[in-house]
Image (cartoon, rainbow, N blue to C red):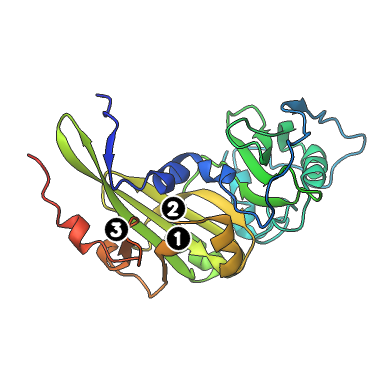
């Protein structure tokens, strides 16, 4: 696969990268102005050997249990419903409490708490799921006195059908659908991103890539993340261009119906952008 050269024009990479890697966990907003350097140890390893038998044991794959069954717990409201994830609630649970919760559940291993160098004012709690290479993260304001979790990225490798999500939690409230272009040695290429959001329940999933997605019941979505509910909190957590691109859910429509130009100041639709002539 040839490497793309990095000349970018109108590319909505914050959304696409988030959908594929959950990187927006370090982009959370805050009402506080950072004034001091965080004192959190950069790579503090938390011991995960609780003295008592935990009450939330992970499902063990058997001949009658699918290997990814543990990734379905949140969809069944186990042990809690969004925005809660495994008893961690964005906007309520502190980072230290999150570590304590994760440490008492054998589903999670290698739990760490620290502050990333790329965003000194934002701290992270990270964990693995057993030894299968899957890991999740939660972000918090490192220089805040409370250090409350703001965003949780589940980090699942599993995708979910749109129909599964609606069956479990009802219709979404908003869509964040964008298009962009990149330029490489072959010319101009379109990129596409779809983020489906349940604002009032505090979670979202999406999909992105070089193929325009069809917004139907069968659309596969991943990149599960949890955040503080309400539109105001979402806008603070995900600043421009994310908050400006939101379109209220109006049922299943085509991509172009929901698509907004991420670099337009007024959230213009994508018609002009999508009409761009690609270089042969």
Cα gap from disc 3 to disc 2, whole angstroms? 12 Å
- Counting from the top left corner in percent of width and height, residue 106 is at 76, 36
Side (left or right) of 2 relative to 75: left
- SS at mark 1? strand
Cα gap from disc 1 to disc 3, whole angstroms? 13 Å
Side (left or right) of 78 relative to 202: right
Graded by Cα atoms within 10 Å as few (under 14), some (14 to 19) or many (20 or more), the crowding at tag 3 reads some
Graded by Cα atoms within 10 Å as few (under 14), some (14 to 19) or many (20 or more), the crowding at tag 1 reads many
**Contact (CB < 8 A) between labels 1 and 3?**
no
- SS at mark 2? strand
Q: Nearer the viewer, mark 3 or mark 2?
A: 2
**Contact (CB < 8 A) between labels 3 and 2?**
no
Name the residue that disc number 1 marks. 196
Q: Which mark is residue 234?
A: none
Residue at 58%, 28% (x, y): give it.
133
**Contact (CB < 8 A) between labels 2 and 1?**
yes
The mark that comes first in sequence, 1 or 3, is 1
Q: Is residue 138 visible?
A: yes
């Amino acid at each position: 696969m040839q490497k793309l050269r990095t000349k970018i024009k109108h590319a909505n990479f914050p959304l696409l990268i988030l959908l594929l890697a959950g990187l927006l966990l370090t982009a959370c907003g805050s009402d506080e102005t950072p004034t001091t350097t965080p004192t959190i140890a950069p790579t503090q390893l938390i011991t995960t050997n609780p003295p008592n038998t935990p009450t939330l044991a992970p499902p063990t794959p058997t001949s009658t249990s699918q290997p990814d069954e543990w990734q379905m717990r949140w969809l069944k409201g186990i042990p809690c419903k969004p925005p809660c994830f495994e008893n961690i609630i964005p906007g309520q649970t502190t980072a230290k409490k999150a570590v304590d919760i994760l440490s008492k559940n054998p589903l999670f291993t290698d739990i760490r708490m620290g502050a990333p160098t790329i965003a000194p004012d934002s701290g992270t709690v990270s964990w693995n799921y057993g030894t299968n290479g899957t890991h999740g993260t939660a972000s918090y304001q490192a220089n805040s006195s409370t250090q409350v979790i703001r965003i949780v990225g589940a980090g699942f490798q599993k995708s979910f059908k749109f129909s599964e999500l609606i069956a479990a939690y009802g219709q979404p409230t908003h869509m964040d659908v964008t298009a962009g272009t990149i330029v490489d040695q072959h010319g101009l290429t379109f990129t596409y991103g779809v983020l489906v959001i349940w604002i009032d329940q505090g979670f979202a999933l999406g999909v992105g890539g070089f193929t325009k997605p069809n917004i139907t019941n069968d659309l596969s979505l991943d990149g599960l993340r949890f955040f503080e509910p309400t539109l105001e909190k979402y806008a603070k957590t995900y600043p421009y261009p994310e908050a400006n691109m939101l379109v209220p859910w109006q049922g299943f429509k085509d991509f172009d119906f929901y698509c907004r130009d991420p670099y337009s100041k007024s959230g213009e639709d994508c018609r002009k952008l999508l009409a761009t002539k690609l270089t042969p």
